[in-house]
Structures are given as C-alpha cells and as structure tokens.
Image: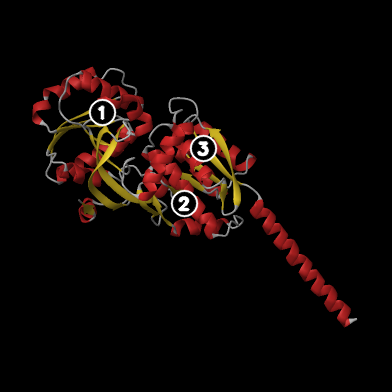
C-alpha cells in the first residue's frame, strides 16, 4: 500500500511539473504584443507612423519577427495627441489588446494624464518623445521608462557647446508655453553663467503664422550678436526657418536639435536650415557601427533619414529585447522584467545608453551643423565636440567635466 501511495504521489508530482512545463512553453510561444501609443491623426499625425512605428517595425524585421524566440505582434492606437484620448487609448491597449509593453507617447500633457493609470496597472511603458520631467522626477513610476530626454536635461551641455562653437553673444526667440520655456530659459541662464551675453529674448504664441514682427526686432540687433537661438517646434519651426531666410537675416542660427528634427522639420525646410548649428543627442551620420547599419537600413527601407526620435523608438526595442532575453522570454514576472531594464546598457545608433535610478535616459549630446550629407539629404552633421553621459540632473560643472573634443 505504501509503495502504491508513493507511486501515486510521485506520478502526481510528475504530472504537475509536466503541466507547469507545458504551460511555460506555451506562454513563451505566444506572441509578445507591443502597443504603440502615438498620434496618427491631428496636428502631430506624422509621429505615429513615421517617427515611432517605422523604426519599431524595422527593428522587428531585422530580428526575424522574434524576441527571445517569441514572435512579435504590433498593435497601434491613435491618441490624436490629446490627453483625454491618451487615457482612453492606453486603457484600450492594456485591457482590450492586452499588450506586454506600451511604446510611444508624444504629448507631455498626455503622458502626465496617463501616468497614474499606467503606474497603478503596473503597465510597462517606454516613452519615446514626451519630455515632461515629472515622469522621471516628482511623479516617477516603477513601470515607466523614458528613452527620450527630460525637459531641460540637455541645456547645460547646449550652453557649453555654444561656447565651444565660438558664440559669445546671442539673441533668442522661443514659443511662449511651458515646453518652450523649459528649454530656452535654462539654456540662456547657463550661457550667461559661462560668460555669454544675451542681447534680446522674444516670446511668440504657439501657432504663429507670421514671424515678421519678431524678425524685425531680431534684425535690429543682428549686428550685435553672433547667433540667434530659436526654440519652437513642428509647424512653427518650419515657418520660422523659411521666413528667417526670406527676411534676409544673415546671423547664423544655433538651436536645440528638436527644433530641427529630421522627420518633422528638416525633411520639409531643407536648404533653409543649412548652416544652423545644433546641440542634439543624435546625427544620422554619427560614425559608429550600430548607427552606420541603422542609417543604411532605414534609408533603404523608408527612403529618408532617421531623426533622433526615430532612434528613441528603435532604442526602446533594443532595451525591451535585451530585457526579455535576460528573463528568458518569460514575461509573467513583471518585476523581473523591470529590474532587467534598469540594469541594461545598450549600444544604440546614438551611442551608449542606460537608465538612471529614476528611469530617465543617460546619453551623449553632440555639436552638429546642418548641411547636405553624403546621401544628398540635408541633415544634422556631427562636428566632433560632445558632452558625454548627460543625465536629467546634470549641472553646468558636470557638463564641463564630461566635455570631449
């Protein structure tokens, strides 16, 4: 009887173990769902398909449609760059589509609108554009990582690189809203701390169609400055660059690289931006093996150059792939996956990347100049000087220590 009992117990254990193994194998064979949360309509409609989805699909294609031996399925949701829709679409991806990770989020207000939901649900999210610094500072979350920059993160480096470019005096014009001020104000402050002089600062409303009055004021001080620094984005930036050249102002421009982002601005303004110097975390022509391969593949696939935000989406997949691989393809333990992401360092097209303790990205910032590149396309071209390891809390002194020619 005892022998029979032991045999029955042993058989039961074997059966349980076999079921567990089968369940694990089946789970690992199920597709991994990547949810893209980004605008596909509205004023920022270009971001969804071109800036976020294209590089993600390129990465998946390059890796045979698999991560850690599991097939990848992409699900998209159009948030229209509206905070109320952002929350609705985040719930759709998490609850209806049951995605394993959300990638994207362009609008900072939208990012803050979904923050609590994502945190409470422990929904792994990798933000590729939105710069609201609260996401990785005062309202940080164990589930939210950002592969973009936090607002104000790059400006100490930008001021230092302006000095290296020989700029001692400047005038500035910025979009008069939180995002514009979060970039321009710290840049000008650090520029002055380095001994530079700001002759004039102008603020324009979002959606300015005619920059004529502002350009008139800039023209008055043109002989007193070595650079004009614009901080506006999207359609405003396109209009400014075209009108600046039409107005006949010869003073060179020095800009935050987002102002001249490849997909959203340079592909439209082209020659009107040539000669502008920028501080930015990427150039399509950074000379490293990962970027050379990425640029060639992107150009071959989409017949255009990638911009930094496209690199963010590609890097999001690099990080996610590495984390999933580290946990053996088993996504049942969300804490293990998040801990893996925290520890991973990657070589991206933009150079080495890793997250800080609050899940904000640490990256290099390069001095670039806009001109026609080897492929005949106007792009931000690297000049050499850079500031390494730029974190979201970097000070001017730290930027000096990390400067490299």
Dot 1: few (<14), some (14–19), or many (≥20) neighbours within 10 Å? many
Q: Quadrant of residue 159?
A: top left
Asked whether, in this view, residue 377 is left or right of residue 70, the answer is left
Q: Indicate which label's residue lies in the foreground, 1 or 3.
A: 1
Residue at figure coordinates x 70%, y 62% from the top left: 21
* Contact between labelled residues 2 and 1, with CB atoms less than 8 Å apart: no
Of helix, strand and loop, which one carries label 1? helix
Residue identifier under label 2 = 319
The residue to which callout 3 is attached is 37
Q: Quadrant of residue 281?
A: top left
Q: Nearer the viewer, residue 202 or 33?
A: 33
Q: Which residue is the extreme one toward the bottom? A: 2
Q: In the image shown, does 205 or 293 lie closer to the viewer? A: 293
Badge 2 marks a residue whose secondary structure is helix
Left or right of residue 105: residue 352: left
Q: CA distance from mark 1 to mark 2?
A: 33 Å
Distance CA(mark 1)–CA(mark 3): 31 Å
Q: Residue at x 26, y 28 (%)?
A: 273
Q: Position of residue 13 (x, y in %)?
A: 77, 70
């Amino acid at each position: 009887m005892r022998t029979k009992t032991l045999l029955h117990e042993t058989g039961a254990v074997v059966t349980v173990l076999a079921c567990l193994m089968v369940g694990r194998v089946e789970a690992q064979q199920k597709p991994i769902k990547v949810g893209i949360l980004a605008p596909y309509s509205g004023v920022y409609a270009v971001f969804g398909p071109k800036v976020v989805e294209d590089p993600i699909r390129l990465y998946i294609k390059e890796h045979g449609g698999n991560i850690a031996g599991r097939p990848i399925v992409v699900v998209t949701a159009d948030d229209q760059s509206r905070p109320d829709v952002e929350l609705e679409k985040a719930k759709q991806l998490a609850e209806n589509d049951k995605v394993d990770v959300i990638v994207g989020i362009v609008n900072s207000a939208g990012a803050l609108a979904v923050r609590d939901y994502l945190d409470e649900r422990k929904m792994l999210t990798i933000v590729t554009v939105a710069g609201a610094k609260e996401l990785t500072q005062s309202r940080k979350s164990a589930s939210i990582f950002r592969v973009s920059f936090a607002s104000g993160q790059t400006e100490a480096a930008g001021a230092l690189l302006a000095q290296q470019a020989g700029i001692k005096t400047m005038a500035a014009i910025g979009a008069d809203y939180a995002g514009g001020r979060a970039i321009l104000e710290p840049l000008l402050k650090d520029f002055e701390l380095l001994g530079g002089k700001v002759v004039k600062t102008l603020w324009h409303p979002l959606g300015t169609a005619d920059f004529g009055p502002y350009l008139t004021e800039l023209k008055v001080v043109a002989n007193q400055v070595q650079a004009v620094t614009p901080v506006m984005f999207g359609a405003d930036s396109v209009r400014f660059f075209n009108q600046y050249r039409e107005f006949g102002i010869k003073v060179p421009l020095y800009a935050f690289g987002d102002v001249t982002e490849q997909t959203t601005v340079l592909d439209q303004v082209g020659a009107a931006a040539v000669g502008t110097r920028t501080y930015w975390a990427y150039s399509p022509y950074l000379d490293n093996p990962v970027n050379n391969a990425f640029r060639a593949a992107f150009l071959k696939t989409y017949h255009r150059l990638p911009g930094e935000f496209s690199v963010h989406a590609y890097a999001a997949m690099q990080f996610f792939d590495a984390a999933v691989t580290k946990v053996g393809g088993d996504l049942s333990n969300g804490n293990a996956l998040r801990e893996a992401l925290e520890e991973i360092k990657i070589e991206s097209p933009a150079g080495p990347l890793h997250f800080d303790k609050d899940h904000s990205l640490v990256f290099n910032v390069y001095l670039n100049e806009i001109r026609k590149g080897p492929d005949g396309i106007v792009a931000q071209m690297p000049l050499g000087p850079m500031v390494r390891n730029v974190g979201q809390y970097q000070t001017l002194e730290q930027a000096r220590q990390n400067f490299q020619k």
